[in-house]
Amino acid sequence: MLVYGEMTQKELDREYSPSSCAPEFTAHLTRYATDSDRAREILDHQLDVRYGPGAAELLDFYPPRRPQSPLFVFVHGGHWQEMSKEDSAFPARDLVEQGAGFIAVGYGLAPEHGIGSMVASVRRALRWTGSHAADLGTRPDLIFAGGSSAGAHLVAMALCAGTEDPCDVAGAVLLSGVYDLEPVRLSYVNDKVRMDGSVATAYSPIRHLPLATPKAIVARGAAETAEYARQHVDFVNELSRHGLQPVDLRVAGRDHFDLPFDLACRGTALGDAVLTHMGL
């Protein structure tokens, strides 16, 4: 029986299981944690800064070394049901070294929290960051937002100008994202996320463009499933149709899980694009 396009349930579930194309994914997840621990050891930081009323609405801040510096706000992935800000500090080392500050955002996860709640949390985090820009060593026009996988979806949705409550940032960096939630709703991922059709429509960024930002990088690893690749292409095309000229990256030698290691690593395709994006 076909459940989406020409795919059976088994085929669709595989397409939304990015580990199927990343045999070393467990090692990458372990490195997220160990590299994040190392960042906390060597960098100045403020942990568990409250940005909203929810129990999980906390962020970790790694300040820039000079005032008036760019600041990158990062939203972690994990199929909207896993991972944490504590495992998401690893990009801080490169970003601080290159002259920026870094924030890792925490938010409530499924099944206790729905997609709408998560998007609202990311919006609150971005607005809190903007309103506290001077205290964070930056300016509102130097705040950039990005995320990986589910985090890319949440950031994109928070920035959608086609909604009633969009956020505005200097630029977006979206890695291996899902921008149309309908096939996700029909896959095993929805066992915990629990979307119905109306939620999938309301929180699909591709349906609410343009983005309220002048610049965007949309990137994916070359080793992604066909559905992640399709979602990437469709989103880039829709951004272009709405007048934005995104930087479109398909990064050779990278998959869904190791692409974020390049986020601000100079000499990599993604890192160089992000640093240029941020004026660094």
Image (tube, rainbow, N blue to C red):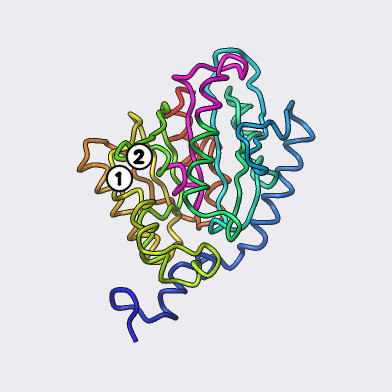
Pointer 2 residue = 160
Q: Is residue 173 magenta?
A: no
Report the side of 166 relative to 44 (left or right): left
Specify the quadrant that holds the N terminus.
Answer: bottom left
Residue 85 found in image quarter? top right
Mark 1 residue element? loop
Crowding at dot 2, Cα within 10 Å, few <14 / some 14-19 / many 20+, comes out as many
Residue located farthest toward the right when viewing the structure as drawn:
41
Crowding at dot 1, Cα within 10 Å, few <14 / some 14-19 / many 20+, comes out as some
Q: Is 189 in front, or is 197?
A: 197
Q: Is 57 in front, or is 10?
A: 57
Residue 271 in picture, x, y percent from top left: 50, 37
Residue at x-position 46% and y-position 67%: 16
> Can you tell which mark lies on residue 208?
1
Residue 86 in picture, x, y percent from top left: 70, 44
Where are the magenta residues, as a range? 127-156
Relative to 14, does residue 204 appear above or below in the rendering? Answer: above
Residue at x-position 42% and y-position 66%: 185
Q: Amino acid at mark 1?
A: His
Residue at x-position 48% and y-position 44%: 119
Circles 2, 1 touching at the beta carbon (< 8 Å) = yes
Report the side of 24 relative to 241 (left or right): right
C-alpha gap between disc 2 and disc 1: 6 Å
Residue at x-position 63% and y-position 27%: 96
> Can you tell which mark lies on residue 177?
none
Mark 2 residue element? loop
Residue 35 in picture, x, y percent from top left: 71, 44
Relative to 256, does residue 144 appear above or below in the rendering? Answer: above
Q: Amino acid at mark 2?
A: Cys
Q: Is 266 in front, or is 39?
A: 39
Relative to 47, does residue 193 appear above or below in the rendering? Answer: below
